[in-house]
Every structure is written in C-alpha cells, then in structure tokens.
Image (cartoon, rainbow, N blue to C red):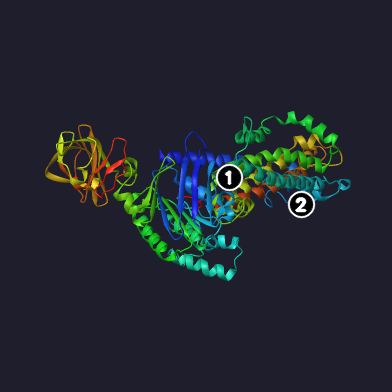
Amino acid sequence: MNLVAENLSYKPDEQFHLDEVSFDFKKGNIYTILGRTLSGKTTLLKTIAGLLTPDTGSMHFEDKNFLKVPVWERNIAMVYQQFINYPHLNVFENVAFPLKQRKVDDQVISDEVTKSLKSVGLEGYENRKIQELSGGQQQRVSLARSLVKNAKILLLDEPLVNLDYKLREQLREEFKNIFSQGLSEDSIVVFSTTDPREAMELNGEVIVLDEGKVLQVGPAKEIFENPKTLKVAEISNDPPMNILKAIIQENKIIFEEIKVDLPSHLSNLKEKNFNLGIRASDIELSDSGFEFEVELAEISGSETLLHLKRGNARIITSIEEVLNFNIQDRVKINFNANKVYAFNEDGVLASSPFGGSYV
Amino acid sequence: MGKLYKILKYFFITFWAVFVVAPFLWALTTSFKDFNSVNGGATYIPWVDFEPKLEGWRVLIKSPANGGVDIIEPYFNSLFVTCTASLISIILGTLSAYALSRFTFKAGFVKNNDITFFFISQRIMPPIVLSIPFFLFLGAINLLDSLIGLIVVYIVLLMPIAVWIMVDFFNKVPREIDETALIDGCNPYQAFFKVVLPNSIPGLIVAGMFCIIFGWIDFFFAFILTFTEVQLLPVKIVALNSSITPWWSLSASALISVAPLIIVAFVVERYLSKGNLSGAIK
C-alpha cells in the first residue's frame, strides 16, 4: 500500500539526474528531500508525478505499477517552486479546476474550494485575477489547488524558495499547521528543500540527496545528530559544517598548531588522522581562545556570520548578536570540543557527540 | 538637451504621421468629389472647398453595364479566400507549433529547430520561384482559376507565418502550466485546449493578423493563378484604369480595399494591450 521505488535511474545527458534511488514512502507521513540545487530533487518529484519516465527502476503504489499509470490518472498534487497557476482563470476557478476535471457536483466544488481557500487564508479573494495577487498569495492559490484534490500523494517542490523572508517564515508555519491537521492518514507528503532548517522544522523523515544519489535516510533529528558522511554534514547544516584536517596526539586534537583537549566521545578513535567537523554555532568568541583572521563578516538577521582563516584552515562561525568586524581583524575563538564530529579519511562518520558511528 | 530632444521627437512624429495619413486623406476627399471638383484645382475641405458628392461610392455597387467598376464580387472573393486560408493556417499552424515547442522530434540529424526552419524557409524564397510549381500543380489537379485552388496556395504561404509566430509564443508559455494541467487530471489534449490555448489568445491574434494582412494584400499569386472565372480584389484594383474609371471611383475603391486591414489593426491593438501572460509565472 506504500509508494515504493527501487533503483530509479535517470540519465538524460552526461550526468545522472537520478542514480539508483530507492525509497519506501508510507501513508500519513511527511518526507523531506534535502539537497542542494541540481541534486535531483525536482527530477525525483517529477518522476513520482509521472512527468518524467526513469530509464531504469520500478515504482509501485497501492500494488499497481505506478510507472505505467499516466500523469492524469495518478491522483497526485504538486506545488512548484515557481508560482504556477492558470492565468486565464480567477482564484476560485483555479482552485476548482482539478475538481471540475473530475466532474464533481457544482455544490460540492463550491464547498470544497471555499474550505481549501480558507485553509490557506485566502477567503474573500475568490473573484480576484491571479495577476492581481502578490507572490505569496499566488503560491497559496497553487497550494489551495493541490489541497482541494485530497490527493493521495502531495508533492511540494521548494514551495517557499521564491518568497521573501517574512512570507517564507509565515507560510512555513502555515504549512506545518496544514500538514498536522488537514492531512488524512491516507496521503503521503513529499517536500523538497535546500534549506536544512526547513527540513528540521517539518520534522518528518529526511532523504538527503546529492548528485542524484540518496546519501542518507532517517528522521530529521537523526540526520542532524549523526550525519553519515561529510557530504551529508555539509548539506544538512546552514552554514555548512566546518571541516578541518586534524590529528590526535597525546589526548589532544591538533590542527593548525591548535591543541584542544580530546573529548570523551572521540577517545576511542582508531585512526590518528581524521576530519574534524564542527558546527558554526558551536564556535564562540573568547578572549582565551585561538587567534584567527577575519576574511568576511556577514550580518544575517540577528546573527553575524564570520568567515575566519588561520593557515590553511578556513571556518565559518555564527554569533548570536550583531557585531561589526573589519576584514583582516584578528579575533579569538574557542571550540566547544564536546560538540565536534569526527569523520574518517574517507569522509564517513567515525564518532558524533550523539554517539553515532558508521565506521 | 531634453527640450530639444522633445521638439525633434514630436517634429519627426508629426512629419511621419502626415506622410502616412496624407494619401488617405487625399483619397478620402477625392472619393467624394465629382468631375468639376477634381479638375478645379487642389481642394480639401468638404462643403467649404467643394460640394461632396456620393457618385464615386455609388459607382462601386453599379454593374459594369451601367458604368460601375464591379468590385463587389472580387471583394467577397478576396474576403472568402483570405479568411478561409487564414483560419486553416492558424489551426494547422498552432497545432504544429505546439508540437514543435513541447515535444522532441528526431529523424536522423533533423531536429525540432530544423523542422521549424523548414516551415519558415518556405517564405525565404522569392515568390516568383514558387509560381511555376504552383501553376503546374494547380493545373494538374484542375484547380487553376478557382477559389479552392487559391485557398490551397494561400495556406501554403500563410501557415509558415502562423507556425513561426506560435512556436515563439508557446516557447514563452511555461511548460509547468501544461504539467500542472496534466497533474490536475487533464490528458494532453485537454491540457492544450483547456489551459494552453486560452492563454495563447494574444499569440493567436498576432498570427491571425499577419495571415490576414499577407493574404489580403497578395497580388502576385492572385494574378498568375486566375484568368477569367475568379478574380481577387488586388488584381481587380490594378486592372482599373484612370482613363476609363474616374478618379473619384478609383479613390473609393482604394479606400474600401484597405478598410478590412484598418479594422484588423484596431481590433488587434485593443487585444494586444489587454492580454498578457504575467501571473502565470513570476
């Protein structure tokens, strides 16, 4: 009864857009596909929708060979990154379109559309033209259109990415509400995003995708706490996790002439050389710390992102206040050694502060 | 600088407007004159300069036996041929343009762009190159000197224009709209007719306008492919001779022959300023 895919591959040109992707989506759950741009997220969603046919692999849904079912019979809904609506129809007609296509009774259409528009906060806009709405409202219309169908599979392809900051925050909240109340036990939601925070907030099952390959599958918390590889650690953190070449000697972690006491969770590492991973948020300014040179300072919202350099080591740290730095300023920072990750030389997680290991 | 630019701009606009409109005004005044007014020197303002007469316009509907110019039949022939050929060209052209825009064709080294170019290349050759093949072809199927034959020829000439304009137009309609229609339960035909086509009205109007204009003004093929049975308006107008047909009738014929194009221009201008695709994708 689940949506099960095995070894889906799609290679229209030199590169794999999908490379042996398998998954098992259960009804009533939210799945987040996390990956950078061009990682194959849209390709995967379009494959589920039936807009693309994979070169190899199989997909089954409710015991049917899903690859044999044409798009228009799949009973899916999809929201695009761009705000796709029918420009020749008004808001009501846009949302009613999929129901009209199913030849549903007029009264039912009217009720369902009103309900759906209400759930996205657009009641009273029924007779507006699409062109008269703002970007956020247009995206809500396409969301309403996909909700009204009560589709068994709801695909959301980076639905928040083209919105401005405030609207994004607001719609993200609404998404969570809609998902938690409005969805029946019968449907599968697949949400794709480049933003790790979005993936963590939706708190469903996360699929980390890169260059068409599935790198890790697991609950959001697990991906955050125990990223399987360096790649996953990079993709699932924003700013990306800092990775430094380090060695262990005499119960110290050593890199760029910096020595840090070895935390207990790293004491069992077998190898001497490893990749040290540390989150930007686990680095703090401290007068007793190590000296670094400022390469760039960005203020984003209420935090400051510092790009720092020392020898060959480049790190990013985020500081929870707005501070002004000049380029080439010297700052002192300290590492929270209890929060560091160790990846072996092949990039696989050897030890995490949360006890995970894939070696 | 700003002021000088403005003065120059309006000077040239005025100059060009006069240049374009003056012949029409001249023809318009002349069409309301009689013999005395035409030969009485340059006069332009009715009732002041000359007494307007409807003789020039009356001649148009008189039979040749009564001294008329007999352009009623060629006029309706032209209307029928142009409209039918344009309509068929738009229908066929739109369908092929949609296919060329959305699907990938490959036959050896021939791809979508080559097929599009093949359509357009029909219009690159000078018309005279096509005249002999058309003549022989229509002769072989017994359609020389007939309305049907002319329609066939005009479809060949007008469809490339429709394909060219509509391919360009469909390329600008986001594919995601078609895809959304498919997801919302339309099969590909319904997606085309229910979603893509209603959003393509501006393109259809432009393509239709070009087809009608090129069809209506064509003289060359109308001239060589007809003899006695069927005559189109441009051929008839050229055949009018000022030593037989008076100036006022010539002016009236000229005006009535451009009238459809003026109507088309006004309708199109209305629509083009109104319809656009914004809101489909941002």
Give the residue type that dot 1 points to: Phe
Q: Residues within 10 Å of mark 2 (few under 14, many from 20)?
A: some
Position of the N terminus of chain B, as image quadrant, is top left
Instruction: Identify which residue, A231 or B136, lies in the foreground.
Output: A231
Amino acid type assigned to the residue bearing label 2 in the image:
Leu
Distance (Cα) linking label 2 and label 1: 49 Å
Which x, y percent locates residue B243? Answer: 81, 37
* Residue receiving disc 1: B170
Residue A298 seen in this snapshot = yes
Q: Taking A204 as reference, is B155 above or below it?
A: above
Q: Secondary structure at mark 1?
A: helix
The x and y percentages for residue A141 are: 47, 59
Sequence-wise, which precedes: disc 2 or disc 1? Answer: 2
Judged left or right of residue A41, residue B194 is right
Relative horizontal placement of residue A310, taking residue A197 as reference (left or right): left
Q: Chain of mark 2?
A: B
| Secondary structure found at label 2 | loop
Residue under label 2: B54
